[in-house]
Amino acid sequence: MSKIMVGVILGAILGALDGMTAWFTPAARPGIIGIVFGSTIKGILAGILIGVFARKVHSLALGIAFGLGVGLVLAFIIAQLQHGYYFQIMLPGGMVGLTVGYATQKYGQSPHLQGAASAH
Amino acid sequence: MNWLGDGTVDRLQANLQVPDLSGTRYRAVRFLAGGGMAAIWLAEDTVLQRRVALKVLDADDSPELASRLLREAHILAALEHPGIVPVHDAGTLPDGRVFYCMKYVEGLRLDDHLTRNPAISDRLRLLLRIAEPVAFAHSRGIIHRDLKPENVMIGPFGEVLVMDWGLGKVFSAPVSESSAQNTGAAELQREPASLRVCSTGHGSVLGTPGYMAPEQLRGEVARMDQRTDVYGLGAILSFMIGNSQAAQSNMLRVGNPVRAICAKAMDSDPNRRYATVEALTADIANYLADSPVSAYPESAVERLARLFNRHRTAVILIAAYLAMRLLFILFSHR
């Protein structure tokens, strides 16, 4: 599995989970499908960006830092659109980015390894 | 009449053992070690101006032992590998003693190295490196038959060398005809009759008790193959994980899979051992990578624990994320 795929799958799962927690906020329940969809897309987008970074840069520390940054930036944009809840949105968003950043550095094959594997 | 003192006799005996290097390119520097049939001297190669080690047959030894020493030199010459000390020269000294010249290796024996108390993972990685030259020799159809900590040297830069191939034996046809010509495999295959039994005429056991496979102990030469060395490596592993003083004093925590690997490598029945050194090292590498090992059928709990160990950070990160989400939900309802 490629590093981008690792990022996409993990980002999608954590993003969907992130969105589903809105169920526990009664005011948000009517729009839960849209929230889960949007949150999943956000996770996938973060996963792609972080996965591409992991393909280019092989450094656990930089991967985690980049993941954290991407997660925070995307969460900040969402919070701006929501006009508030910065802490509640950005903290989980940052953690998702950090986790995906770690996972893409640790798991998934680099392109040159994939090439070698397919050659066999 | 004046009797010679003990010290004088010792000195005379020592001088008798000093090899006569006159007329050769070597100059003896000092005695390094003595074995059952030969002594190893540190010498200087006066032509290339470098230090070398000379293994010289003891003065009063038989032609049979001379041919054994030459066989050892042939085996070393056939095995060009970074983990096997290279032989430079072989021949007969002016005093009639057979010798061969090899690279002088500085460093610590494995048993001495273990007193530095390396971690269990470092010990296992070390065993993987010890196994490399042994596996290489097997690929050339040669088994060592005397693997033990005293025959492994750890160099100052971490290089690992398997020494003392004096009991080496050809167990099958070499990989190619050309290499057979190079190694003199046919010559190597003709063992002296005394090597087929457990003791030589000099009373030395062919192998080292505790490190010898049962078939070797019984002198069943025909049954000896690479699995005999697998047993030796298992015995070294056993020494590395439990029998060394350092290990005992520090109560090394060794997992059940490592003990199972050790037990499988040292099975009294060669058919139940690892068939090859590569199979043994694959299991050790799997253990080091937190992957399942073939020698140990793990329970569901052990499997979970291993998977947790393998993905510890990722599991902790995801758990932390879920815990944070849970806290948010709890606080939002207050």
Image (tube, rainbow, N blue to C red):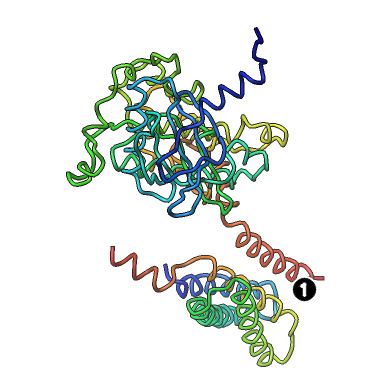
Q: Is residue B117 visible from the viewing direction of this image?
A: yes
Q: Secondary structure at mark 1?
A: helix
Image position, residue A26 (x, y; %) = 70, 76
Q: Is residue A83 above or below residue B287?
A: below
Foreground: B263 or B143? B143
> Where does the N terminus of chain A fall, quadrant-wise?
bottom left
> Where does the C terminus of chain A fall, quadrant-wise?
bottom left
Image position, residue B68 (x, y; %) = 35, 27
Q: Amino acid at mark 1?
A: Ser
Image position, residue B40 (x, y; %) = 50, 34
The image quadrant of residue B100 is: top left
**Residue B163 appears left or right of B119:** left
- Taking the view exactly as shown, the residue that stands out farthest to the left is B177
Foreground: B63 or B49? B49
Q: Residue at x 33, y 43 (%)?
A: B77
Image position, residue B190 (x, y; %) = 24, 26
The image quadrant of residue B109 is: top right
Foreground: B328 or B203? B203
Q: What residue would you read off at disc 1?
A: B332
Chain of residue at mark 1: B
The image quadrant of residue A64 is: bottom right
